[in-house]
């Protein structure tokens, strides 16, 4: 019997586990993989997270994170927009970051089961029953769904977005190359865009989003990269001057940016499980950390002040909507501007001549420091 069971140990799950365990709650976190591991992500985190991370005693720069304060965006033709990033961010691999947070969550007293999958969650008479892949059962007063973009649990919960296939595929490499450590680049190609930014140990993250159809048409990831991605002159130059450090890329499918709900059958959703912002905005990790900060804060308050479940659920759902719904909407709109070679070229040319507009757009996809 636990106060809270957290399903999924990405950023949202681990931050919830750290805050709730430090507040004295009995926490069980279940993660289907085993730390440390790589996952598809651009690994650029907005500085809006730093005050909160520092308040937890976490300083990613101590773990080698790069500091990023300049943005480059290029069209498939090579037209380039460059601008300072007002707030900026830092770069660190999820391999390192998640492993460090896992260790901090363990030290805070959380029970963490790795290599196990949550198969079923049943809510009855104010309690949850949680069944794992090895058939063990746990009970808890609350469940946090922090299981990311898409899992079988979404099917069981009959969530709307799960009924529609998503066309998007994400691919990630770590490379060594020669590129300013304080820059993040976003290079566009037909039906895709590719981010490049420094992480720890003088390594760089090269991560792109494209469509399944793009890859299918060319027969393989490598063939698509050759035919389309490396047509962008900046990516072509990068390829000629980079060591690829993985034997094969990390790949994920079915990335959906469709609206979701932050509450499903009394499960409190956090991070991507509540809504995923397009990677174009580079802000999903900040939102995962922020949503975990907000949710764990209300859970602690609810326990201390004996809130009814309904009060907790309504408060969290309203605050989540207020903090994130607009950003997700702007992200979806921006996403439509990218991919089409002509529209992307026009959009970048326009933003080049109107830097205040470009700065305003970046601001709209980011939140305030918290
Ligand atoms: C191509 C791409 C590039 C991106 N680039 C950036 C970027 O540069 N900056 C940024 O801020 N954001 C970026 N994002 C978004 C960012 O990766 C996510 O928003 C962030 O990882 C969300 O964290 P999370 O904790 O919600 O989910 P995740 O980090 O996905 O963690 C979910 C965890 O749940 C586990 N899990 C799933 N199902 C179960 C189950 N049934 N039982 C147990 N465990 C389970 C999974 O193994 C996983 O570890 C990008 C996304 C994509 C697709």
Image (cartoon, helix red, strand yellow):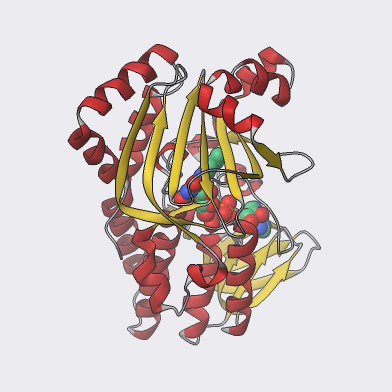
Q: Quadrant of residue 250?
A: top right
Image coords of residue 157 (percent x, y) = 56, 47
281, above or below 29, in the image: above
Say which of 93 and 299 sits in front. Answer: 93
103, above or below 277, in the image: below
Q: Quadrant of residue 8?
A: bottom right
Image coords of residue 80 (percent x, y) = 38, 27
Q: Quadrant of residue 154?
A: top right
Image coords of residue 59 (percent x, y) = 47, 73
The quarter in which the N terminus is drawn is bottom right
Say which of 338 and 292 sits in front. Answer: 338
111, above or below 334, in the image: below
Asked whether residue 273 appears in the rendered view, the answer is no
Q: Residue at x 25, y 22 (%)?
A: 350
Left-right relation of 334 to 194:
left
Asked whether residue 217 appears in the rendered view, the answer is yes
Q: Residue at x 35, y 53 (%)?
A: 88
Q: Residue at x 57, y 66 (%)?
A: 6
Say which of 36 and 225 sits in front. Answer: 225
Image coords of residue 209 (percent x, y) = 55, 32
The quarter in which the C terminus is drawn is bottom left
């Amino acid at each position: 019997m636990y106060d809270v069971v957290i399903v999924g140990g990405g950023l949202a799950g681990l931050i919830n586990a750290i805050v709730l365990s430090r507040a004295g709650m009995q926490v069980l976190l279940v993660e289907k993989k085993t730390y440390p591991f790589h996952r598809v992500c651009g690994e650029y985190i907005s500085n809006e997270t730093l005050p909160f991370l520092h308040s937890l005693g976490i300083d990613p720069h101590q773990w080698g994170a790069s500091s990023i304060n300049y943005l480059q965006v290029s069209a498939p033709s090579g037209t380039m927009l460059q601008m300072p990033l007002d707030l900026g961010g830092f770069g660190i691999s999820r391999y390192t970051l998640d492993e460090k947070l896992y260790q901090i969550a363990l030290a805070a007293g959380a029970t963490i089961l790795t290599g196990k999958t949550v198969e079923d969650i049943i809510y009855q008479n104010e309690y949850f029953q949680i069944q794992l892949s090895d058939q063990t059962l746990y009970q808890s007063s609350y469940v946090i769904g922090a299981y990311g973009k898409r899992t079988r649990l979404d099917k069981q919960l009959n969530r709307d977005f799960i009924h529609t296939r998503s066309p998007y595929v994400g691919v990630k490499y770590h490379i060594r190359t020669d590129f300013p450590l304080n820059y993040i680049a976003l290079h566009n190609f037909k039906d895709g865009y590719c981010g490049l930014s420094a992480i720890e140990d003088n390594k760089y993250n090269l991560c792109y989003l494209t469509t399944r159809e793009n890859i299918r048409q060319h027969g393989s990831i490598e063939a698509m990269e050759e035919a389309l991605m490396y047509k962008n002159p900046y990516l072509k130059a990068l390829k000629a001057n980079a060591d690829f450090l993985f034997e094969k890329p990390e790949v994920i499918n079915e990335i959906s940016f469709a609206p979701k709900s932050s509450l499903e059958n009394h499960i409190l959703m956090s991070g991507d499980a509540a809504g995923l912002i397009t990677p174009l905005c580079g802000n999903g990790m900040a939102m995962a950390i922020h949503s975990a900060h907000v949710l764990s804060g209300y859970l602690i308050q609810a326990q201390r002040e004996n809130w009814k479940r309904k009060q907790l659920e309504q408060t969290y759902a309203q605050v989540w909507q207020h903090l994130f719904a607009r950003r997700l909407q702007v992200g979806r709109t921006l996403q439509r501007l990218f991919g089409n070679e002509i529209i992307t070229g026009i959009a970048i040319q326009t933003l080049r001549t109107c830097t205040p507009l470009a700065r305003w757009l970046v601001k709209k996809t980011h939140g305030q420091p918290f």
